[in-house]
Amino acid sequence: MRVLIVEDEVRLARNIADVLQATCGYAVDISVDGEDGRHMALTNPYDLVILDLMLPKIGGLSILRDLRSAGAGVPVLILTARDGTEDIVQGLDAGSDDYLTKPFEMAELVARCKALIRRGYDRPNPLIQVGLLAVDTRARSVQADGRPVELTAMEYRVLEYLALRAGEIVSKEDILEHLYDFDAERFSNVVEVYISALRRKLGGRQDAMVIRTFRGQGYRLEGENT
């Protein structure tokens, strides 16, 4: 999953990014002003935007309105030092999905981020079942036909993304966009490597859980219930 943090308190933004990377394995981009943040949010396929209201150049509410006017359905979590009802209502009316008032506990932020991302893919249940495959997005664990499967961090991220979009054909480019932030080095065959490793590790009944290749289009995670 890929997250954008638009927050001008640099230390706070970095702390949030570090926590999301360490506990969730998310790819995280940071912007410290509203003008740059709006551009990033409108031009990249994020799974979540964490947005401060008080920003230099362009305020958070303006960014939020621009996102919704452009038809962007990305979940948005508002961060604000304001705790007045009017400010909260304005954010929700402008199209935010949730909010946190500063200061906040990082554990709560992480839980809200996970829930918003799942909701964005219409997967409110943290346990995703695809045939005999079970992906627990809270524990970041996987079982195949009742058997625990040990995955690397990147293998899990690929599988989680395919599970959130189970039944859909997901392009290689789309997978890459949601796996890496701006600073990451990308290799042309990295997706094929991870898909091959996942197929080998999942094993089991291939009619009940399979990552199917569609030449020239991408990959689709399938199971008996998709």
Image: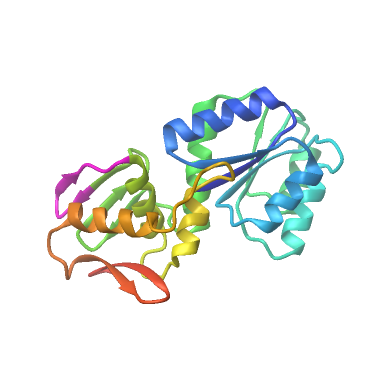
Name above or below for residue 173 compared with residue 108: below
Percent coordinates x, y for residue 10 in the rendering: 69, 26
Name above or below for residue 23 compared with residue 47: above
The residue range painted magenta reads 143-152
Residue lying at 68% horizontally and 52% vertically, measured from the top left: 41
Percent coordinates x, y for residue 180 in the rendering: 50, 47
For residue 191, what is the image quadrant? bottom left
Residue lying at 23% horizontally and 63% vertically, measured from the top left: 131
149 is within the stretch colored magenta: yes
User: Looking at the image, which is closer to me, 129 or 38?
Assistant: 38
Asked whether the viewer can see residue 226, the reply is no
Give the quarter of the figure containing the C terminus.
Answer: bottom left
122 is within the stretch colored magenta: no
For residue 123, what is the image quadrant? bottom left
Residue lying at 67% horizontally and 61% vertically, measured from the top left: 72
Image check: 43 left or right of 130? right
